[in-house]
Image (cartoon, rainbow, N blue to C red):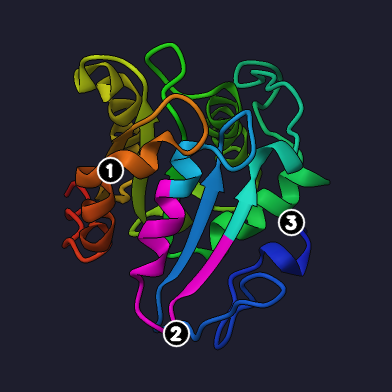
Amino acid sequence: ECRFPRRFARRAGRESFGPDMSAPDDRRRFLFLVCSARADGNSELLARRAAEALPAGTGRRWMRLADFPLPPFEDRRHAGDGAYPLPAGPAAELLEATFAATDLVIVAPVYWYGLPAAAKLYLDHWSGWMRVPGLDFKARMAGKTMWAISTYSDTDPAFAEPLFATLRLSAQYLAMRWGGSLLGEGNRPGDVLADAHALAATARLFTRSAGSPPG
């Protein structure tokens, strides 16, 4: 029998969503994961504008991955029974917040045409969480919606596509819905506030109909 803390158990009724932000189970709960290597960067500024357009009563929580440092991921899939232990410390906090959310928003600038290291490490740990006996990570992620908000500082927005493709395919693998993405232009902190097109799009991002998960 696998035993794990009640914090990871499936809950009925009301579920806590952050110290000052909760919502009944029939309301959406957005987890904004800020993955930048600097605070108050352009991607976060864009995400906070988008969050302002969420309906009143929508649960929302902000977590900076830099404040929840994860250990290097160790691939144990082919060692022994391939099982992983329950996460502890910052990993457990991230896992609990991930489970609590209905909508997962990855807030990540384009670094070397892909995700920042902190975001990639978070996704790597999903591989371990899928193999924690009794946790049912993959089944519990199915049906959630993933979104991406990013910024770039280049001449061609196509350079951001590898970042978005990584997240879309990750969502597809877990039978999550893909909500959509938002891309702004900015290099120095605050530059994105001059991107009128991206700012206008923040009001529409979360009103889109999320795509259905694969059948």
**CA distance separating discs 1 and 2:** 23 Å
Instruction: Tell me the amino acid under the disc marked 1.
Output: Leu
Residue in the picture at 16% in, 49% down:
215
Name the mark on residue 34.
Answer: none
Observer-nearest residue: 75 or 60?
Answer: 60
Boundaries of the magenta span: 46-61
Which quadrant of the figure has residue 198?
Answer: top left
Helix, strand or loop under label 3: loop
Name the mark on residue 1.
Answer: 3
Instruction: Tell me the amino acid under the disc marked 2.
Output: Gly
For disc 2, the neighbor class at 10 Å (few under 14, some 14 to 19, many from 20) is few
Sequence-first tag of 3 and 1: 3
Helix, strand or loop under label 2: loop
Image vertical order of residue 18 relative to residue 185, above or below: below
Residue that carries the numbered disc 1 in the rendered image: 182
Residue contact at pointers 3 and 1, CB within 8 angstroms: no
In the rendered image, residue 214, in percent from the top left (x then y), is placed at: 19, 46
Instruction: Tell me the amino acid under the disc marked 3.
Output: Glu
**CA distance separating discs 2 and 3:** 39 Å
* Disc 3 versus disc 1: nearer the observer: 1
Residue in the picture at 57% in, 63% down:
61
Whether residue 55 appears in magenta in the rendering, the answer is yes
Sequence-first tag of 1 and 2: 2
Which quadrant would the N terminus be assigned to in this image? bottom right
Image vertical order of residue 30 relative to residue 105, above or below: below
